Amino acid sequence: MADSTAEGNYNAENIQVLEGMEAVRKRPAMYIGDTGERGYHHLVYEVVDNSIDEALAGYCSMIDVVINPDGSLTVQDDGRGIPVDMHPTQHKPAIEVVLTILHAGGKFDGSNYKVSGGLHGVGVSCVNALSDWMRVEVRRGGKIHHIEFSRGHVTKPLEVVGECGEETGTKVTFFPDHTIFSCHAFKWEILCARLRELAFLNKGVTIHFRDDEGEAHHEETFHYDGGIDEFVGYLNQNKKAISPVIHFEGEKPGLTGMVQAEVSMQYTESYSTLEQTYCNNIHTIEGGTHLSGFRRALTATIKKYGLDNKLLKEKEFDSLTGDDMREGLTVVVSVKVPQPQFEGQTKTKLGNGEVDGIVAGIVSDKLMTFFEENPAAAKVVIEKTRLAAAAREAARAARESTRRKGVMDGLSLPGKLKDCSERDPSKTELYLVEGDSAGGSASQGRDRATQAILPLRGKILNVEKARIDRMLANNEIRTLITAIGCGFGEEWDISKARYHKIVIMTDADVDGAHIRTLLLTFFYRKMPELIDRGYVYLAQPPLYKVERKKKVEYVLTDGDLTQKLLTLGLDDFEVKGKDGAALDPERAKALLTLLAEIEATAKMVEERGFSPAALVADESAQGSGASMLKKQFSSLSAFGYGPSDWFGGPLPKLLDDVRAHGKTGLSIYRFKGLGEMDDDELYDTTMNPAKRHMLRVKLSDAVAADQMFTLLMGDEVEPRRKFIEDNALNVRNLDF
Ligand code: 28G
């Protein structure tokens, strides 16, 4: 009844609110992109962006983000606080207007444009519309004000709930409407990546992030006085730098107001290029005018400096391309544009034309000065460029010669490829199969109309460590390029893809994992569009074959097998609790599942040379293994048991007994490789579209993906060891 519309006066303002909030709820995807994981986290970005705007205006230095135990999320800032006085035309408090009227943010304040704003820039009123409830607290003018909403409508009108002295700021807590979203929890990793990025892009702001949900208790503080310079250092932490971090910034008037541009760059020994570009804090994945301006200025300046200083001959000069000059480069470009135009397929390409010239102007002046003042660094960069050009020339020659043999254009497909008959790529699948014997089974068992098989022999070349010419000289890689059909490098054409599903099918062992990683590195570095479009998949062959009373079943993972054994084992088995009373079947299953998890974690911790019992006892012990074990034992305490019941206690025997009971009458066979399955078995379990489980490879976080491939495939041994150790318990990271 507290909603102002409940009084019956349906004036124009109330209708505006009603229609606005209902429009958002009716078509949420139009406002926040989608209603899955992405949209769910997008809600947080919209709220945090308000605080960032307040920081950019110079009034806020601290932003606190907390995932609460009930699954809601709180953002708090120390800005001026959203105004609470009556709005001049809307006849309600300004705060209510900000939170219930679409696009209220920028509308009644022309002078101070909104530079932040998420990808969709829809404002916090959309978050309100899509939240089951939202509570807002404002500290301002010595008083604490409070207002509450449900699904975008006021449920508790603005009131003063206390005093706060000089303190000012805004605190927003919201619980997304789970009837709208398919994702129902905030993920630490996803929010962490974005909050870290925001702290890099807005130097000096402190963002504190904590997870109070469950028992995870993660906590991080992001604060970078070095801004995007520190960002470049972070991106290059596992690469060998061959230049210092170079920084440029400036501002110039554009068509819609002042444009600010900031660039940080550093060359490394790597053969790949990492370009991260932003407009108004939004990651412009498709690039745009800021990126083209940067590239143009970089190319022109390097050429000019090289020629003027006789580091390059006229002839070499002609053969250099922009790509050559960006090999090994990591660059962050961040611009602030008053009325950004976003274009492209995913609306992440900056379109404002004048930004190209503004960025180019800032970069060329200052890069030339840098080269003149640091001739040694300039020499290293130009030498790297020369080598990249030479390798590219060699690759082109290799490509020409293979083209003459018809390899690149798909005229003659490789002999090893068992192609399908269907020609419509949206209906066809290419299986990349480890080993000739599995390749044989797959060829026999497949659906010949739509499924093609390419057996791969031995290891794929590590493209992270090989220059392009050596890569194209490699037979497996050439075969792969021809079979896929899109060409390579300058001639890449996604529309020529011969299959829209490319399925990596490897054994579930260390060698299989290695081959899979090598193939993923190849696709990520050399054919990223395949991954962007979601064409790359991982097959999931079963790990076990289980027979019971002549009935055969296939089991995918160790975890699934344990679940199966526990279910069978508990069927006519009574488990007594701490107090001696029998546990009901649900609780018994929960207890045994937990014991199985503890067993698995303890085993991995031991394999890494630690004592699990000692780790659990040591309060200060950290690392994924220690915190996971502690979390598991804290769950176990809900059953009244502690670590002493497991380590040297009776509980391991309980787990063994139930499992052994579950195994009676079963025959369990663990596949050692794909080659052990016959044609029909392989098709039925792994390739049959009606039954198979496949994972689609997604790389939503470019920063994390670049670091992962650099680490896994590069030659820095120590960080790789640490990465693998840190992630040993989190294999999902490697599978995306
Ligand atoms: C904690 C979660 C998200 C915010 C402010 C501060 C002001 C504001 C927000 O104004 C538009 C513009 C001026 C009236 C601005 C306070 C000027 C003076 C603000 C936030 C309408 C709204 N005093 N902090 N909005 N004003 N933090 N954090 O939402 O004319 S939103």
Image: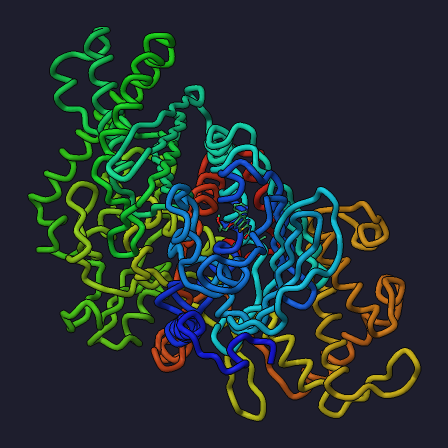
- As drawn, which residue projects farthest toward the left? 404
Q: Horizontally, is 367 left or right of 396 in the view?
A: right
Residue 423 quadrant: bottom left
Q: Position of residue 722 (x, y in %)?
A: 60, 40
As rendered, which of 63 and 443 lies closer to the eye? 63
Q: Quadrant of residue 249?
A: top left
**Residue visible at 49% across and 70% down in the picture:** 130
- Decide if residue 628 is on the left or right side of residue 465: right
Q: Nearer the viewer, residue 481 or 93?
A: 93
Quadrant of the rendered image containing residue 1: bottom right
Q: Nearer the viewer, residue 499 or 562?
A: 499
Please say which color scheme the image uses.
rainbow
Q: x, y percentage for residue 9?
A: 48, 79
Give percent across and percent down for residue 496: 15, 57
User: Residue at 27% across / 61% down in the picture?
Assistant: 454
Q: Residue furthest right?
A: 579
